[in-house]
Image (spheres, helix red, strand yellow):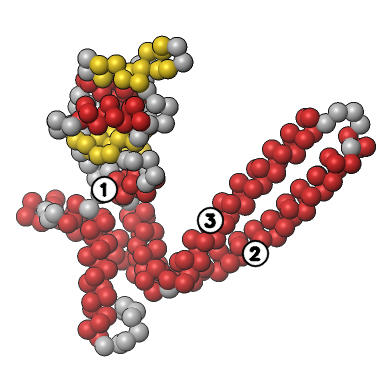
Amino acid sequence: MLIDPQLQGIKWIRAKEKGRNLRFVRLGQKALLDKLKAALENGWALLIENLDQTVDAVLAPVIRRAGIKRGKKQFLKVGDTEVEWHPDFRLYLHTKLSNPHFPPEIQAETTLVNFTVTEKGLEDQLLALVVRKERRDLAELGEQLVEQQNGFKIKMKELEDNILFKLAMAQGDITEDVELIEGLEETKRIATDIETKAALARATQAHIRLTCEKYRPVAKRASLLFFLLNDLVQVHTYYITRWLLSSLSFTEAWTACRYRSTGATGSGTGRGR
């Protein structure tokens, strides 16, 4: 269950499920049951967007995972039809309500993920946006280092699992098992090499963060501006605007204004003031 007033969760889901044939549907659409059945049978991801505070009863067996086992296969009842339940099937429920009150069973059976933007969270997003505009080289290097660090963690876990497997399968006196000892030495060499590279990557990341922090005041003011504009509705409903409901639209509008303003100064540096 995604609580997503600013529609950032939708963007995240699109990226996460890019290779899983993600389908979108809304409650009340005629295609709901057909898309649900197709996703269940084929192991696709289905996102039901813009939910109100009620959920259609036809979704109850799916949300409860009320499977019916027949042989080695699992089935779910959708309406009057039993549909084979593919193990790769994923269901995402989405609401734009900032403080929804769903029935207790929905909260108990789903994982709630709150994408509601906070002032600090928006500030960090805008900082990343500014850095990408001003220092694309640093932004791209930072992303590469994050991927590299994740790769190091995965490799270290594989090495640890391999060591444990070899020790578990070893027979007799392990001090006389030449192949095992050579394997352990090679694992130690790889682990040392990874640790050296990881330390260098951490130092580079620290330098990147230090440089990025120079742009923090810009991001902080922009984040403050968003929430000030958002709170104007408390003064009068006249101040409700369509783009204001989405922080994504706000960042796009803010970026366009900022860099259009830069062009007007004729600085030629491509950097805003």
Task: Verify CB contact (< 8 Å) between mark 3 and mark 2.
Answer: no
Name which of mark 3 and mark 1 comes first in the sequence.
1
Task: Verify CB contact (< 8 Å) between mark 2 and mark 1.
Answer: no
Q: Which of the numbered marks, if any, corresponds to residue 18?
A: none
Q: Which residue is mark 2?
A: 200
At label 1, counting other C-alpha atoms closer than 10 Å, the crowd grade (few under 14, some 14-19, many 20 or more) is many
- Across and down, in percent, residue 2 comes to 31, 38
Select label 3 or label 2 by which is in front: 3
Q: Residue at x 42, y 17 (%)?
A: 73
Check disc 1 and report its element: helix, strand or loop. loop
Name the quadrant containing residue 171. Answer: top right
Amino acid under disc 2: Leu
Check disc 3 and report its element: helix, strand or loop. helix
Front-lying residue, 194 or 162 = 162
- Across and down, in percent, residue 237 comes to 8, 51
Select label 3 or label 1 by which is in front: 3
Amino acid under disc 3: Glu
* The C terminus sits in image quarter: bottom left
* The N terminus sits in image quarter: top left
Name the quadrant containing residue 99. Answer: top left
Q: Which of the numbered marks, if any, corresponds to residue 7?
A: 1
Q: Which of the numbered marks, if any, corresponds to residue 147?
A: 3
Q: Residue at x 83, y 31 (%)?
A: 170
